[in-house]
Image (cartoon, coloured by chain):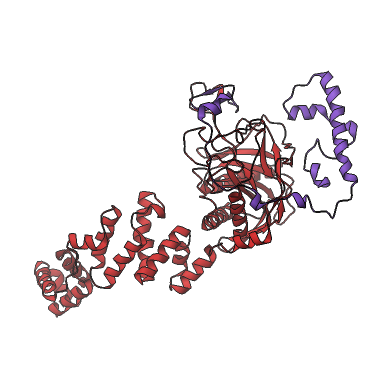
Chain colours: A red, B purple
Amino acid sequence: MELEPVIGLEIHVQLKTRTKLFCRCEAAFGDPPNTHTCPVCLGLPGALPVLNTKAVELGVRAALAINCTVNRASQFARKNYFYPDLPKGYQISQYDRPLASNGHLDAGEPAVRVRLTRLHLEEDAGKSMHEGFPDSDVRSYLDLNRCGVPLAEIVSEPDIRTPGQAHDFLTHLKTTLQYVDVSDCNMEEGSLRCDANVSLRLPGGPLPGYKVEVKNLNSFRNVQRALEYEIERQGKILRDGGEITRETRLYDADRGLTSSMRSKEEAHDYRYFPEPDLLPLEVTEEQIESIRATIPELFAEKSKRFADRYQLPGYDAAILASSKALADYFEECAVQSGNPKASSNWIMTEMMRELKNRTIDVPAFPISPASLALLIRRIDDGTITGKAAKEVFAILCEGGGDVDGIIKEKGLLQIQDDSAIEAAVAQVIQANPKPAEQYRNGKTATLGFLVGQVMKATGGRANPQKAGELLKRALS
Amino acid sequence: MNALLFATGSNILRPLRSDAVDIDYVARLAHLALSADEKARLGPQMAHILDWVRQMDEVTAADVPAASSAAMHLQFGRPDEPAPSLATEDALGNAPDGKAGLFRVPLIIER
């Protein structure tokens, strides 16, 4: 029996505000526990929420970037449930009148359109800790710094059919949200979280009567793995004639499987009702349009422009445009060096390798785009050879000095004087009689080896082309 | 406004007859241990309150925008500027139990 997965995703992103959604406590990550709380986010009696307009602005920005219609009027609602990480006993969220609806993203190759049901604003809960304390067998601990931090929840339609598509979609969504600078989208720090709904149906059939929610997905890779596991698990049950009930399962990344999450809570009845402490939220057409005007060029557009304007292969353009930070780096380097192709090459090879080795992101990369551009100019204007440039690059990576200073200090200036190279050529021919003889006998491939020897003899400072020419002349 | 007020997925607040409030269910959701006397008293009271609010349904308001005059325009919120938070010991001081700068509660997961 062939079965087709039906997958929908719910993504929470933490909006990049300085303060929480309804109080002026700092929305900071990694500070000592319970240092950012107040009567509002602690849910003390009589405290009243006041809306952070920046969060609304970022929510609108995110909504526009994912092609949603921003609703002129929306409403906050109370979602009632008891859990100690939510001291008020309810979460202020949005229910039947979300901030935005009806969006979509086209992701993957070939592109798959994933419709987005809605984007709404809500407050985050605190962080509970169940491990690592002497009394962890009977007690849980709570840090409420995160409690009340603004989130945008984005809900997709069940348009995804494979775990790979889910991965592509999430990557594209993250890139988009980072482009518009509404969130750090850092899964490790929890500023992007994802839950997946998955069920199976006969291909093209009606939506299944059940869905299984998978939680605890802390990387895109794990989203993909958890979905693969879950599709296999459900397929086996259905093929054996079994039935699957609606439930929530937790993914265990270490063991690579999902397990049913038993809940002490009542069956979910959140008793949503309009938040009486906040008036309906109205966003004017002018406000929406003024935010729309600040949406920058997004990934798809940018990668196409890179390919066209800078004459780059589509693959390279897409990688350079994959994050706004990298795209900005490339473009600054390309413009300042006047050599987009070389900029692309240096970034795609040398810089990417360093980023990977150091497990850092573009903003933490020790070489500024201006420095890399200058380095490229120094190759193009004949000051140094490509080989010497790599040496300069390595020193810059260690945070040492400026391009021209390093060239001077390390004596890397390209040898301009032919006679100095000629001397090296003569020396290399004498030291390598066999390859020299082979070249003379028509085995021209040995020239490359000899050029390498000349480069070595000159400390990488000879122009390799010039070295080749002089070698040829000497051997003819 | 009237239609939206309680038509939001809740079992207790969906249109129902006055005598149909399931007070056991409501109490369970609210984590309240009510005595039989209290249930007998509070059930009808709650139904009465719902009936009172439900009068709104009799008003023809389908073409009236929800609370348009009192809507919170974006400029009525507050700017994104931090203010000092409570000292940790003050925050914890309101809680029944805390340790090492953390709130401490009975274990909330099943082992």
Compared with residue A102, is residue B51 higher up or lower down, i.e. above or below?
above
Task: Indicate the quadrant where residue B24 lies.
Answer: top right
- Residue drawn at the location 80% of the way across and 41% of the way down: B6
Q: Is residue A458 left or right of residue B100?
A: left
Residue A241, given in percent of the width and then of the height, sits at 71, 42
Left or right of A205 in this view: A33: left
Q: Is residue A399 left or right of residue B47?
A: left
Q: How many marks?
A: 0
Q: Is residue A322 above or below residue B47?
A: below
- A250 on left or right of B11: left
Asked whether the viewer can see residue A306, the reply is: yes
Residue at x 15%, y 80% (from the top left corner): A473
Q: Nearer the viewer, residue A84 or B25?
A: A84
Q: Quadrant of the C terminus of chain A?
A: bottom left
The picture places residue A158, in percent across and down from the top left corner, at: 67, 52
Return the x and y of residue A10 as percentages of the image width and height.
63, 48
Nearest to the observer: residue A212 or residue A345: A345
Say whether residue A7 is visible. Answer: no
> Hey, which quadrant is residue B95 in on the image?
top right
Q: Position of residue A353 (x, y in %)?
A: 36, 56
| Position above or below: A177 against A303 | above
Residue at x 30%, y 66% (from the top left corner):
A374
Q: Residue at x 66, y 31 (%)?
A: A263
Between A117 and A26, the one lying in front of the other is A26
